[in-house]
Image (cartoon, rainbow, N blue to C red):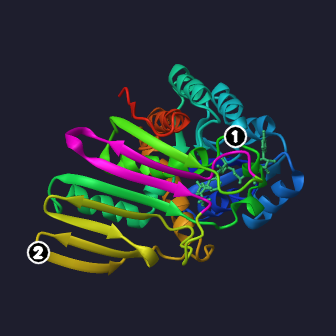
Amino acid sequence: MVNENRSKVAVIGCGFFATNHILSWSNFKDVDLVGVCDLDEERAINASNISKGTPYFTDAELMLKEVRPDVVDIVTTAPSHYHLAKLAASLNISAIIQKPMAPSLKEATKIVDLAETTKTPMMVHENFRFQQPIRDLKNFITNDNIGQHLFCKISFRTSFDIYTNQPYLKEVDQLVLMDLGVHVLDTARFLFGEATSICCRTQKTRSDIAGEDMATMMLGFSEERTAIVECTYGSKQVPDLFPETLVSVEGTNGAITLGAGYQMFKRSGEKVETINAEPSVDDWCEKPWHVVQDSVKNTCRHWIDTVPQNLKPETSVDDNLKTLKLVEAAYQSAAKGGSLVTMDN
Ligand code: NAD
Ligand code: 89V
């Protein structure tokens, strides 16, 4: 869907990941990227250079007051999200906030309250559910192809060196569930709805990081549906499929698997099909990051196709709080060696 009205977008945070946002916004025909901002001037200038000279700033408040965007895209790390969302709300500007919404469930709740009390539309940039192969898989299971849903497995296992691009990840006490768990748990919610219980075990595979880098979870859903959800930055598997997410869903009448190399295997009754579900590689994208980059573009597009039309985005902050509640419950379970935690939905 293409809007007739143009949207004005500004970006705060021009670090490692923001390039994908800036290039996504710059390539939409109905969006004007009106400002980019980073405390680090060199990063702000670089962001301006890659987006055909978008005005750059080193002070977020100054930028928002000067360029008056319809929406500000906050691509800083979690500790600054609440403060920046509050700034946006105080200026009556909508906000998109990168995952994780906040460093804790408590602070995420403050963002949800802020959005509600100020009536400011706010969405979390939770992009995994916007990966095209995962959207395709969801369509297949919701169109009555596999019968009653029984079982789901979501797996993201790699030892890709994330710490070079994101050194701050070595310092956080809660690592893999907050950084990657949010993605895979949100994908589980997207595919199977709200979990009624969760158990989780975590492990640490190296000594130079503060947090855990391996998590294995089992989620229960109504009607005895079950999901195994796992994520790790410490898997020495070959081949290393970074940044692919493997997903399979089984039902009473069929199954679908998104496998390595984006091979998708579908079974509906006796009909079996294999397709290549690899996302396209836009001009500004490069393999193997294209699946992530494509999903960033789709997530930004989701905002443009919803909020300006007064529609609620799928990953509104109140929706995303449910993902963070699962993360918190997973940590509670892990602290007790993997005991069952019942979700209060
Ligand atoms: P980064 O540290 O590389 O960049 C963050 C930038 O924000 C820094 O340049 C910093 O100077 C700037 N900044 C911080 N506070 C600011 C403020 N008040 N005003 C202006 N600039 C400010 O971090 P990153 O690795 O790019 O991560 C950013 C966010 O993106 C994190 O929340 C991370 O979890 C998320 N991320 C998401 C994905 C994904 O697939 N969705 C992938 C990687 C990172
Ligand atoms: O950091 C992240 O959010 C992840 C990735 C696996 C790409 O690093 O998306």
Look at the image and tell me whether residue 70 can be seen: no
Out of 215 and 44, give the one closest to the viewer: 215
Out of 335 and 14, give the one closest to the viewer: 335
Residue 50 place in picture, x, y as percent: 75, 66
- To which quarter of the image does residue 48 belong? bottom right
Q: What element carries label 2?
A: loop
Please tell me how crowded label 2 is: few (under 14), some (14-19), or many (20+) other residues with Cα within 10 Å: few
Which residue is tagged 1? 173
Q: Which amino acid does label 2 sit on?
A: Glu
Work out whether 27 lies above or below 148.
below
Check residue 34 for magenta coloring.
Answer: no
Out of 19 and 107, give the one closest to the viewer: 107
In magenta, the rendered stretch is: 209-234
Name which residue lies at 76% across and 45% down: 171
Q: Which amino acid does label 1 sit on?
A: Asp
Please tell me how crowded label 1 is: few (under 14), some (14-19), or many (20+) other residues with Cα within 10 Å: few
Q: Quadrant of the C terminus?
A: top left
Work out whether 160 lies above or below 222.
below
Residue 330 place in picture, x, y as percent: 49, 38
Spatial separation of the CA atoms under disc 2 and disc 1: 48 Å
Residue 320 place in picture, x, y as percent: 48, 38
Check residue 217 for magenta coloring.
Answer: yes
Look at the image and tell me whether residue 46 can be seen: yes
| Disc on res. 270 | 2
- In the rendered structure, the answer to whether residue 339 lies left or right of residue 35 reads left
